[in-house]
Image: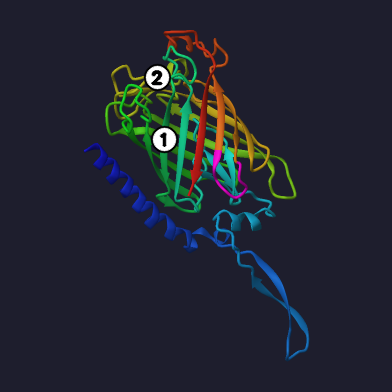
Amino acid sequence: MQKLLIFILYSFFGLFSFSYADPLRNSEEFGNSHKKKTLGWEKYTSSKSKGEGFIWKEIQNKEENFFKEESVISQRESILDVRSIGRAVTINGRPYPEISNYVPNAYVEDWRKTMTISFRGISRTRPCGGKNFSKGCIDGVLDFDFNLINLDKFSLNPKVNMQSLSSRGTSIGEGISLGFKAAKKLSNKWSLALGGENIVHFDDTIDLGRNFYLVASTYKTLFKKKNGKDVLMFFNGGLGTDFYGYKGNGFLGKVNCFGKPNLTGNGTTSCSVGPIGSIAIAFNDRVALINEWFGYGYGSGISIKPFTNQSLSFSLYITDYISTFPVYLEESCPYAQCKTRFYSGLSVTF
C-alpha cells in the first residue's frame, strides 16, 4: 500500500509539472526576457537601391543544456535576474551553486526547471553516541521539488521528502512527507516566500518537525566582471517553526503547525517560532561560501558547481563546532559531549 501511494504521488506531481509548467514557458506571460534569442547582424546589399544595410540574423544555439542560451545573451545585462533551483540559484539563466542548505531562499523558481532532486547527508545525528560516519549514526534525506505553477513573478512548488534512506531504526523508503514553497518577486532585488517542510506526513516515522517558514531574500553585487560571473553576496532571512524554532531559538512564540508528532509542541499541534537566516558569497558561478543559522543549529561550508553549464552542485558544511553554542546544544547530546559534525548537499535540476 505504501509503495502504491508513493508511485501515485510521484506520478501526480510529475504529470502536473510537465503539463502545467512547460506550456507557461512559451506563453507571452513570461515577457521578452524569457524569449530572447542570440542575434547577430548580417550585411546585405539592396539590388534596387544599390546601397548597403543590415538585417537581423538568428544564430542557432546548438548547446543541449537548457541554461546555455539565456546565459550567453544575459551576461551583458546590468539588472540581474535571480531565480531559484532548490537551494541553489540561477543568475540571468546561468546556474550558480547553493546559497544555503537548511535555510530556504525566497526566489521565484527558474522557469526552465521541471524538477530538482537534492540529497542531504549527515555524518552523525546529535543523539547518537557513536563517531562521525559510523554505522547507526550516519543518515540522510532525499527531496523531489517540482515546478507546478511558474509565472514571471510567482511560483508554487510542491516538495516530496523521503527521510529514511538507511535502516537506522526505520525501513528504507519510510518517512515520506509533503511540503511546498510559494514565492513572490517583489522587486528586482527582493523576493518573499511562504512555505513548509515535512507538513503532510504519510507515516508516523518522521522526526524532522513540521517546519513552516516565511523568508525574504536579496543580494548585493560586490565585484562586477566582464564575463558576467560577478561576485555576489546573498542574504536570506525570516521566521520558521518547529525545527527552525527548536529549543531556545523558539523565543518568538507559538503557532499552530497543523499536526503532530512535531519537535516543539509537547504533544500538541502548537509549534515554537524562531529566526533563521543565511549569508553566502558566490565568488563566481562555481564556488560559494555559506554561513547559516537554522534554529536547530548552525552551519558553515562551501558549495561547488563543477560544470559550467550544468546545474549539478555539491556542498559540504560543518556544524556544532562550538561545543557550548547554542546554550541548549548539550541537551541534544545525551550520550556524549557535542562535537563537530558534518552535513552535505548534492543537487541537480532538470
Q: Is residue 14 above or below residue 198?
A: below
Q: Nearer the viewer, residue 131 or 39?
A: 131
Q: Farthest residue toward the right?
A: 51
Q: Farthest residue toward the bottom?
A: 48
Q: Is residue 108 above or below residue 99?
A: below
Q: Which mark is residue 142?
A: 1
Q: What is the magenta range?
A: 306-313
Q: Amino acid at mark 1?
A: Leu
Q: Position of residue 19 (x, y in %)?
A: 37, 57
Q: Is residue 293 above or below residue 303?
A: above
Q: Main secondary structure of the magenta part?
A: loop
Q: Amino acid at mark 2?
A: Gly
Label 1 crowd bin: few (<14), some (14–19), many (20+), radius 10 Å: many
The scheme the figure's colours follow is rainbow
Q: Position of residue 260 (x, y in %)?
A: 29, 25
Q: Position of residue 103 (x, y in %)?
A: 50, 31
Give the residue at x 55% y 11%. Answer: 323
Give the residue at x 49% y 30%. Answer: 102
Q: Label 2: which residue? A: 136
